[in-house]
Image (tube, grey):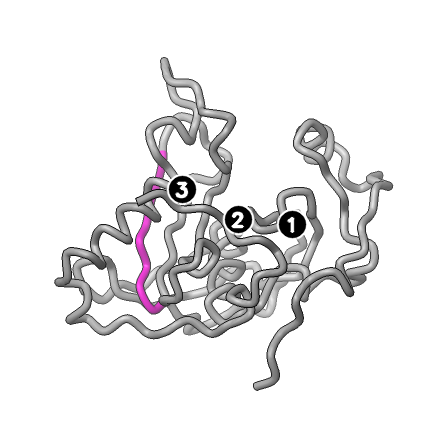
Amino acid sequence: MTLTPLDQQDPRLRQICAVVAKSQLRDKQQQLEIDALLDFVHGVVNKTQRGIRRDPSRPNTVGLAANQVGIMKQIVVADMAIGRQGYTDIHVLVNPEILWISKALVNKPEGCVNFPEVWGVPERSRAIKIGAYDRSGNEVEMKLTGWPAVLMQHEIDHLSGRLFIDRLPDPRRAHLVRASELSEYRRGRGEWNHYVDVSQSVVKPTAN
């Protein structure tokens, strides 16, 4: 099963994903979908390792909500070893929910495979606690701080049809960052002056 990111105009990005029943996790087809999500985030060529070079044609992401690739279920795959090229910390989280958030906030640059040239700096809670099932149906809880907390807030937003651009202080001045500029952006985003207006260019949230 080969997965492809949805286009930013696809209305499925704004839909609330379906809860996955524990009984569904015993289904072979459901497990094949999870395998495909895992491969999308971290196939053997998707992250640079010793002796293995990442395939530049593959999307480079550390997290994926299932609806980003058209699977309308509450499943997230996340590599908590963010920025670590030597190892991974992959988690499959089914029906994840935020149980607690810190009052302390952080501002870190975020991008999205559905918006390959759009970046920005939303405000997120610095620490969170989440509850979920793993792919076998076992209950798990995780306390996350810093980048992993930001990552999970980003992905759980996706499951509710919310995008990181909705949280930008000014979506008319989202950062336009082409692939060749990404390293430069990460080094000096505070002085970045290439912008794109995403306030009118993408499908809007549906009313609740």
Residue that badge 2 annotates: 147
Mark-to-mark CA distance, 2 and 3: 17 Å
Queried whether the magenta region covers residue 91, the answer comes back as yes
Q: Which segment did they paint magenta?
A: 88-95
Disc 1 or disc 3, which is closer to the eye?
3
Instruction: Say what amino acid the circle numbered 1 marks.
Output: Lys
Disc 2 or disc 3, which is closer to the eye?
3
Queried whether the magenta region covers residue 100, the answer comes back as no
Earlier in the chain: of badge 1 and badge 3, it is 3
Q: Quadrant of the N terminus?
A: top left
Q: Which mark is residue 28?
A: none
Whether the residues at callouts 2 and 1 have beta carbons within 8 Å, the answer is yes
Q: Quadrant of the C terminus?
A: bottom right
Residue closest to the eye, 16 or 134: 16
Label 2, residues with CA under 10 Å away: few <14, some 14-19, many ≥20: some
Residue closest to the eye, 67 or 87: 67
Residue that badge 3 annotates: 41
Q: Quadrant of residue 104?
A: bottom right
Label 3, residues with CA under 10 Å away: few <14, some 14-19, many ≥20: many
Q: Residue at x 43, y 19 (%)?
A: 53
Mark-to-mark CA distance, 1 and 3: 20 Å
Instruction: Say what amino acid the circle numbered 2 marks.
Output: Trp
Instruction: Say what amino acid the circle numbered 3 marks.
Output: Val
Is 79 rendered above or below residue 95?
A: above
User: Where does the image place residue 169, in percent across and percent down from the top left?
Assistant: 77, 63
Q: Residue at x 44, y 51 (%)?
A: 64
Residue that badge 1 annotates: 108
